[in-house]
Image (cartoon, rainbow, N blue to C red):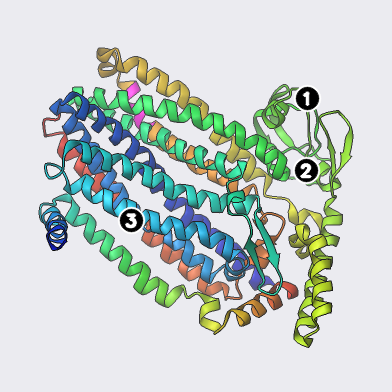
């Protein structure tokens, strides 16, 4: 049991490490592709050579990021087959379809049109080249769509029926995969890439301004980066609001963890800033926070778009208590009952197995029918106590605040940068703003990673919500092998990151000596 | 048809020839794919169910046994 827990923990660390590294490359690819598309569109429309130089400069940075980042996501698929083989089998049909489509689309669209982007200058018409640039951007986003649809399904499993004979969830409605959660997640993640790339373009351009090189080029780039970033960020916030409502409906425990909320209430306030009390447990009377500043009604508005709505806390969810829109107390299923029903579903599956081995079709069908009555709580059967179903509160709480606070700061940042960019002299003169832009590049990456930490840590202990916790999804492999590969990945990805940063820095620095204005 | 294929080949060949920074990137991509697919996939990341069982029925049985005994 101890080795199983160690294997689970190390496998989770490994998956988190590889996903975090992968997500360093992906949002920049998604956003920079759009920014390059906008720049090239301006070039094609105006025919102005300076926009051609601008496009080629950022396109090369896009290419560096694309080349270093490509295939880093495949590592996650390796981990599914080795570390998470039970999960992989359990969800194979559902998870496999979007990933297969993603692989084909990514390969054909990106491989074809990226080649035209880089090799096609002067060989294909301007219009065809521009179309290729945009198709690369669209292809990258469509690739992301399938990955995010698969991820959303893990958070809200729909469109399938469990077959105990195959031990798989079999897809019975492909279109159900495009749930509200999936749609919000897709736009939220992809548009956040626009914001991140916008900051990237501004930060690199501000380095040119600091060096007093290619200042016209820098201002031109900053305008496109800031507009794209601002639009992306505002839409990210809009879809984030949609995500909050979806999480309240389908993953209320995640929302409670994001807020460190143990006992919910109507007109629930939102903690703007605070410190979580590490001694607080779901079943003790400690104060949840060591310090907190609240926004009155904030959480009720965020979660249910109603200032007076009830938002359940961790203890309410465990007890199975909620209050509906009419103000009536309603009972959902308590965690104690979920655990019982989960164990009953597993017992039915055991009976199914015994009947199957005995070739008793009637008993198999009876066991299957019994199991399906409680299947929605199947995963709870692996727990001995309700606290095992509570996500890590502190990490979720702080990550959510990092995401929201930095995200809010970014609005101000984009507005100030835009204001300054249209007063060229001011932006060129104010060194503090140029330095702020470069520091903001680190902050936007932090914000982007924090968003994923909220989404993924907040849904623990589940790999598939309510159906399969991590302790059941894990393979029977020794923890030593996971620890070894963890460090191998840490080394490889760190080297890739160093390669990316150094190649980019050298390219940017070389271009300071070339006339881009 | 052959002419089209030749043109496509020439397009890529010329593109690769005229690369500057791209050569280094292709080298990185090549090394990376080699490490991922030849070293990691082969020696460290087998698909456990495919490796240990011959049929889907055996794989399903293994997962059923594991998930009902944890």
Residue name at image x 71 percent, y 34 percent:
A290
Compared with residue B47, is residue A278 higher up or lower down, i.e. above or below?
Answer: above
Identify which residue, B6 or A90, lies in the foreground. B6
Identify which residue, A114 or A405, lies in the foreground. A114
Q: Main secondary structure of the magenta part?
A: helix
Quarter holding the C terminus of chain A is: top left
Q: Is residue B61 magenta?
A: no
Extent of the magenta region:
A433-439
How crowded pointer 2 is (Cα within 10 Å; few <14, some 14-19, many 20+) is rated as many
Residue A457 in the figure: left or right of residue A382: left
Q: Give the numbered dot on residue A108.
A: 3
The nearer-to-camera label among 3 and 1 is: 3
Q: How far apart are marks 2 and 3 (CA)?
A: 46 Å
Q: Mark 2 points at which residue?
A: A314
| Residue A255 seen | yes
Q: Mark 3 lies on which chain?
A: A
On the image, the x and y values in percent for residue A415 come to: 41, 19
| Residue A384 seen | no
Q: Mark 1 points at which residue?
A: A267
Q: Distance between the residues labelled 2 and 1?
A: 17 Å
Helix, strand or loop at mark 2 = helix
| Residue A102 found in image quarter | bottom left
Q: Which chain carries label 2?
A: A
């Amino acid at each position: 049991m101890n080795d199983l827990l160690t294997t689970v923990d190390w496998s989770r660390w490994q998956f988190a490490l590889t996903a975090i590294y992968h997500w360093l490359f992906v949002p920049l690819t998604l956003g920079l592709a759009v920014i390059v598309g906008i720049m090239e569109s301006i070039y094609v429309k105006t025919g102005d050579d300076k926009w051609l130089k601008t496009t080629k400069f950022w396109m090369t940075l896009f290419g560096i990021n694309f080349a270093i980042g490509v295939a880093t996501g495949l590592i996650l698929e390796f981990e599914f087959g080795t570390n998470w083989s039970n999960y992989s089998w359990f969800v194979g049909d559902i998870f496999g379809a979007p990933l297969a489509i993603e692989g084909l689309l990514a390969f054909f669209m990106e491989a074809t049109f990226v080649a035209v982007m880089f090799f096609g200058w002067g060989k294909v018409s301007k219009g065809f080249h521009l179309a290729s640039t945009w198709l690369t951007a669209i292809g990258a986003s469509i690739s992301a769509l399938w990955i995010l649809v698969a991820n959303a399904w893990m958070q809200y499993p729909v469109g399938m029926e469990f077959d105990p004979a195959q031990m798989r969830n079999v897809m019975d409605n492909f279109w159900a995969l495009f749930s509200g959660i999936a749609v919000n997640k897709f736009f939220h993640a992809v548009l956040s890439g626009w914001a991140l790339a916008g900051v990237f373009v501004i930060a690199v351009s501000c380095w040119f301004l600091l060096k007093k090189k290619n200042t016209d080029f820098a201002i031109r780039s900053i305008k496109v980066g800031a507009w794209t970033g601002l639009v992306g960020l505002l839409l990210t916030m809009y879809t984030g609001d949609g995500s909050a409502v979806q999480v309240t409906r389908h993953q209320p425990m995640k929302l409670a963890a994001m807020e460190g909320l143990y006992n919910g209430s109507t007109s629930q306030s939102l903690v703007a800033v605070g410190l979580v009390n590490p001694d607080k447990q779901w079943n003790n009377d400690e104060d949840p926070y060591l310090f907190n500043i609240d926004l009155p009604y904030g959480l009720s508005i965020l979660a249910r778009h109603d200032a007076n709505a009830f938002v359940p806390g961790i203890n309410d969810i465990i007890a199975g208590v909620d209050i509906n829109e009419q103000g009536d107390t309603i009972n959902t299923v308590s965690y104690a009952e979920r655990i019982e029903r989960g164990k009953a579903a597993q017992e039915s599956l055991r009976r199914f197995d015994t009947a199957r081995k005995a070739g008793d079709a009637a008993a198999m069908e009876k066991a299957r029918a019994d199991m399906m009555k409680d299947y929605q709580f199947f995963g709870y059967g692996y727990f001995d106590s309700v606290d095992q179903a509570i996500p890590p509160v502190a990490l979720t709480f702080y990550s959510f605040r990092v995401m929201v606070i930095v995200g809010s700061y970014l609005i101000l940042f984009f507005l100030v940068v835009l204001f300054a960019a249209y007063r060229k002299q001011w932006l060129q003169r104010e060194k503090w703003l140029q330095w702020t832009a470069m520091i903001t590049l680190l902050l936007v990456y932090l914000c982007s990673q924090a968003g994923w930490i909220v989404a993924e840590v907040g849904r623990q202990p589940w790999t598939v919500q309510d159906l399969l916790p991590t302790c059941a999804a894990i393979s029977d492999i020794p923890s030593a092998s996971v620890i070894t590969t963890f460090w191998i990945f840490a080394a490889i990805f760190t080297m890739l990151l160093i390669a990316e940063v150094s190649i980019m820095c050298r390219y940017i620095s070389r271009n300071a000596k070339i006339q881009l204005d | 048809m052959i002419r089209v294929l030749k043109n496509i080949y020439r397009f890529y060949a010329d593109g690769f020839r005229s690369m500057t920074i791209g050569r280094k990137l292709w080298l990185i991509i090549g090394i990376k794919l080699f490490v991922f697919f030849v070293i990691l996939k082969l020696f460290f990341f087998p698909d456990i169910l495919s490796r240990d069982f011959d049929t889907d029925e055996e794989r399903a049985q293994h997962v059923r046994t594991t998930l009902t005994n944890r």
